[in-house]
């Protein structure tokens, strides 16, 4: 099974068989969140997409090192001109907080939300602010190789020079001439030679509260730098897979390729994977459009666009119902449908342990398994895999109803296959809270039954039985109040 | 209330009124875990102790910045000679893992355990490996001031030189002459001038996989350095409180004082607080003694010394039942007693919302409040505060039983006071799982009652009633199996 995983490589625009650099091991780097605000819907998709990849590679037997960074410095607000303040810094000044306190708060929030979505923690979660030396080291090697220049304590990447030897724009399918045509000229207010050059190191103004010493200036690293420095540090100069949202392909990943190549003379990433975007009722999500939804708002239902709360597992299932390279559109209807589908799936999983066995089988479980894994091997085609799981749901329900049959060996195979795919690979788990509510409902029904039986005892004048029932309920801590419509109960 | 908190300062060996450096704000630094193994009982105490301090300062109205570090580099195994390998490094070689992967795994484990213990995350959780530049900067300033020397790419702190101007040993009550007498002489195999000098920067051997470039060598910082660098970075050159376990006072905190003073010319910490140790059945906890218990083992009961599992809240309550400066001894008996006590306390809290009000009060709630806060103000005397809470429990139970009475205003005051202290300050929360188990027990009892009623119906030949009960249970998804001893049930 191991050698059948095929992934779509953004760099070659082709599906390619996954062959790792080191046999039996897989190195995976994914761009993590910038921790200056609440985790939102836009974070859910890449993190769930690459969680499935992490889980599936692990299932296939690879020893996976999954690195996902935390950007807590250097992400400029105005990316096109790079003249804006650091986003975290701005927030910190606003709230009069230490930038690291802001970063910590939102990082904790991100971790909590990922846990709710059952996204596994990565093997290593490096922080940009924790790798300043590594980034400075990378700047030095790019300077030494002649692909960067220093101006007034800042260091910029020389895109034109780089493009003479390598090709800038190959990942996103751009070429430098087009970029030149489409970029406005510098008005003389910039230190950069060309508007498309990007900062590797920025000199900080004296009142800038996030800065580190360097041989060029007290300053901070450019945003693109951290991913190049940290991916190569933890995965090696050449590694297997780099993932992220499609919106990061240009300029972020393009600049990463340029930095790594300028430093090492060769590209470091073998497979580039990009997940597509989420739209909300057909629109891009943006604060200015009023359709910006945080994960906490989704889970609580506390947002004007939401008809109700949707559980983390519903969100996870919803995202997996689309292939990661397709767009998906969020709407109440679509989420309600996902909620129903997930319930149906998990109900079937709940039946697996007690299906009645027959002496023969009327369904082909091996074929079902093969089709499902074939879908996962085909560039992680989760919607097709889920469609096959629903064929399995039909089989499970038919066995339960007695209209189809399976031998005990086939039931075991179905059971193990289903739980592996649903729990381990897709990471869908029955929600605790749902279980709690179910028990409350059950208790309610039981107490009503018991009280009905007590009324019947009274009706047939069996006072001893009626008293015994009352005393037993009291002993259990249940208080009954008679109301106009019957009775209410509370638990002490 | 704000100006009444008194804390015991290890430095002056006196209880002192807490007066912050900046009015209305409190800066707190606590030594966090070295993340190279599972979180154990020894981690529970300092983290719970300073969690109470964090919560209490916040309750008193201070804006608290609580910094607790993660040591993921530089803690040498053989501290006395500093010739041992880095602990994390050793484990990484053993497991053939990247050191940061080991650190990440155990850091995640630590975070999970702290969450279970309801220990709040600190405001900032800096990692030693993420502050190499800051540490190098500190070494430079100590070198510049003449209190350190470089030998073969390593830099050592010159304790003797420092002691000529300042006093080395003042925190732990040692003086250098005694230390000299009690320390064996160097045999010539060390680069250090004196055996009591300590490393600020260590040159790494070429195969050392955790090393960073510096002006002295590729190497790594000495263990004591990180806390000086990170506390001053995030809290300022002079800050309020530094906490940690008593075992860290010497040499770790002593060296921190020396480093900060050598660098800045003055001490940086106003109040030093140290929690005492935990013993297990009278012995020190140590792997070699076979009495080493991890928190996961405690929570699961999976350890030969444990009679049963103890919940995180039981551990928390047990630790709070002793004053943080006293030793506490772990035993099954003591934990069982804590479990019982906590249940009694939380049961009383559960009654608070439905206490019957009277027209007058027979108990003095204001006095109870004052006594409780007086105990907390007295160097966080949690056992005395808890004793007062149990006076409150007695009042609550007496009101419930009708033998004492409170006005509605007094009930409100008691309610708000109790929940503030129990939930917000002591951080004791009713455990979800306990609630779940209770419901299961209740369901069990109900089903038995219903089945008994059904047997009685059969006995009096009321077949219609017996069938109705059976059908209702089936409709609820409950399956009944007759057994020799009566019946068993399962929920579909």
Image: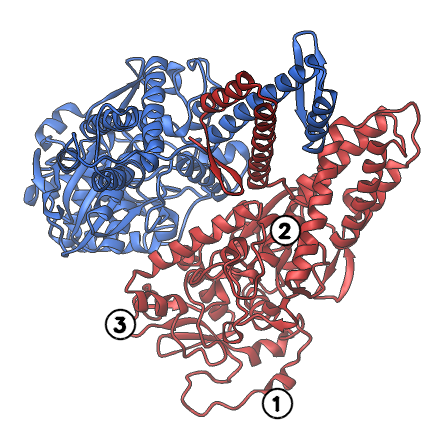
Chain colours: A blue, B red
Please check whether the numbered discs 2 and 3 fall on a single chain: yes
Task: Answer left or right for A384 relative to A226.
Answer: left
Question: Where is residue B155 shown, x and y percent of the image?
Answer: 42, 74
The disc label shown at residue A343, or none: none
Instruction: Please give the chain letter of the residue carrying mark 1.
Output: B
In primary-sequence order, the first of circles 2 and 3 is: 3
User: What whole-number distance in Å separates the C-alpha atoms at marks 1 and 3?
Assistant: 37 Å
Q: Do the residues at discs 1 and 3 belong to one chain?
A: yes
- Vertical side of B232 occupied by B144: above or below: below
As drawn, the residue found furthest toward the top would be A484
* Residue in the foreground of this view, choosing between B227 and A211: B227
Q: Up-down: is B24 above or below A487? A: below
Q: Residues within 10 Å of mark 2 (few under 14, many from 20)?
A: many
- The 10 Å Cα crowd at callout 3, few under 14, some 14 to 19, many 20 or more, is few
Q: Is residue A106 left or right of residue A444?
A: left
Callout count: 3
Residue B119 image offset from top left, x and y in percent: 58, 47
Residue that label 3 marks: B207
Q: Which mark is residue B314?
A: 2
Q: Which chain does the residue under circle 3 lie in?
A: B
Measured Cα–Cα span from mark 2 to mark 3: 46 Å
Q: Which mark is residue B181?
A: 1
Asked which secondary structure carries label 2, the reply is helix
**What quarter of the picture does the N terminus of chain B occupy?**
top right
Please, which chain is the residue tagged with disc 2 on? B
Cα distance, mark 1 to mark 2?
45 Å
**Of residues A471 and A492, the one drawn nearer to the viewer in this rendering:** A471
Mark 1 or mark 2, which is nearer to you?
Answer: 2
* Residue A20 shows in this picture: yes
Q: Is residue A313 left or right of residue A457?
A: left
Residue B273, can we see it? no
**At 67% from the left edge and 55% from the top edge, which residue is drawn?**
B336
């Amino acid at each position: 099974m191991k050698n059948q995983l095929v992934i779509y490589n953004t760099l070659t625009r082709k599906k390619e068989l996954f062959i790792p650099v080191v046999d039996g091991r897989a190195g995976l780097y994914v761009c993590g969140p910038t921790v200056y605000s609440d985790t939102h819907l836009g974070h859910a998709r890449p993190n769930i997409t690459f969680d499935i990849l992490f889980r599936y590679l692990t299932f296939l037997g690879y020893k996976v090192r999954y690195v996902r960074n935390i950007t807590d410095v250097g992400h400029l607000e105005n990316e096109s001109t790079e003249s804006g303040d650091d986003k975290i810094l701005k927030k910190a000044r606003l709230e009069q907080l230490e930038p690291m306190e802001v970063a910590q708060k939102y990082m904790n929030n991100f971790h909590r939300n990922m846990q709710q979505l059952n996204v596994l923690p990565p093997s290593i979660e490096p922080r940009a602010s924790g790798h300043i030396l590594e980034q400075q080291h990378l700047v030095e090697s790019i300077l030494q190789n002649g692909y960067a220049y220093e101006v007034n304590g800042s260091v910029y990447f020389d895109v034109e020079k780089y493009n003479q030897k390598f090709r800038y724009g190959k990942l996103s399918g751009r070429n430098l001439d087009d970029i030149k045509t489409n970029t406005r000229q510098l008005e003389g207010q910039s230190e950069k030679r060309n508007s498309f050059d990007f900062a590797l190191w920025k000199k900080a103004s004296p009142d800038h509260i996030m800065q580190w010493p360097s041989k060029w200036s007290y300053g901070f690293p450019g945003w693109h730098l951290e991913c190049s420095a940290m991916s190569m540090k933890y995965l090696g100069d050449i590694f297997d897979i780099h993932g992220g949202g499609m919106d990061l392909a240009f300029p972020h990943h393009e600049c990463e390729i340029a930095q790594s190549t300028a430093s090492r003379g060769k590209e470091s990433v073998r497979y580039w994977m990009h997940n597509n975007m989420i739209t909300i009722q057909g629109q891009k999500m943006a604060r200015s459009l009023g359709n910006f939804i945080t994960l906490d708002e989704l889970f609580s239902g506390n947002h004007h666009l939401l008809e109700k709360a949707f559980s983390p597992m519903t969100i996870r299932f919803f995202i997996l119902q689309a292939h990661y390279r397709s767009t998906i559109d969020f709407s109440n209807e679509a989420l309600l449908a996902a909620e129903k589908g997930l319930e149906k799936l998990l109900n079937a999983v709940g039946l697996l342990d007690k299906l009645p066995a027959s002496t023969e089988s009327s369904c082909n479980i091996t074929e079902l398994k093969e089709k499902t894994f074939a879908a996962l091997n085909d560039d992680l085609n989760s919607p097709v895999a889920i469609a096959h799981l629903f064929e399995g749901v039909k089989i499970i329900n038919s066995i339960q109803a007695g209209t189809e049959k399976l031998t005990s060996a086939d039931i075991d195979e179905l059971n193990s296959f289903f739980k592996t795919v649903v729990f381990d690979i897709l990471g869908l788990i029955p929600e605790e809270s749902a279980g709690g509510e179910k028990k409350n409902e059950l208790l309610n029904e039981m107490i009503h039954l018991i009280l009905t039986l007590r009324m019947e005892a009274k009706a047939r004048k069996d006072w001893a039985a009626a008293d015994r029932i009352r005393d037993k309920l009291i002993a259990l801590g249940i208080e009954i109040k008679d109301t106009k419509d019957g009775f209410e109960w509370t638990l002490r």
